[in-house]
Amino acid sequence: MPRRSIWKGSFVDAFLFRMQKKRDLILSRKIWSRRSSISPEFVDCSVLIYNGKTPVRCKITEGKVGHKFGEFASTRPSRTNKKGKGRKGKK
């Protein structure tokens, strides 16, 4: 039995589907649909993907085709370890 993605097809939001035909509208456009798949029509475009707080600029390349837009805009802040913060009482 084929995988679900083969018989179901990739999801592209209706708003993005209309934009694919008009390539001029895609350039530097804000995208709120993180669940939509990236199709080959978006290659060599720069889009702003919303991460829940601010839009994140992302350049679409050949290697990103087939993935979801949300994979390239992290929603969680990166944590850095602060020096000097260790276990208290450790000798």
Image (cartoon, grey):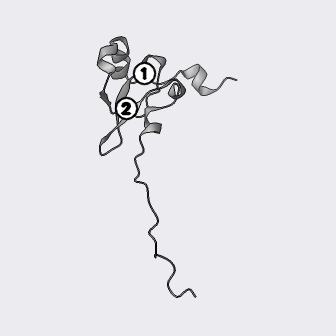
Locate the N terminus by quadrant.
top right
Q: Residue furthest right?
A: 1
Q: Quadrant of the C terminus?
A: bottom right
Q: Nearer the viewer, residue 33 or 38?
A: 38
Q: Residue at x 34, y 14 (%)?
A: 23
Image coordinates of residue 58 in percent, x first then y, are: 39, 33
Quadrant of the rendered structure where residue 36 is? top left
Q: Nearer the viewer, residue 10 or 62?
A: 62
Q: Amino acid at mark 1?
A: Asp
Q: Nearer the viewer, mark 1 or mark 2?
A: 1
**Secondary structure at numbered mark 2:** loop
Using the rendered view, name the quadrant where residue 56 is placed.
Answer: top left
Residue drawn at x 29%, y 43% as measured from the top left = 54
Instruction: Count residues near mark 1 (Cα–Cα under 10 Å), then give few for <14, some for 14-19, many for 20+.
Output: few
Which residue position is annotated with label 1? 44
User: For numbered disc 1, what is the local secondary structure?
Assistant: loop
x and y percentages locating residue 35 in the rendered image: 43, 33
Residue occupying the point 47% across, 32% down: 68
Q: Which mark is residue 33?
A: 2
Question: With 73 as the anchor, is 5 left or right in this view?
Answer: right
Labels 1 and 2: the sequence-earlier one: 2
x, y percent for residue 12: 43, 23
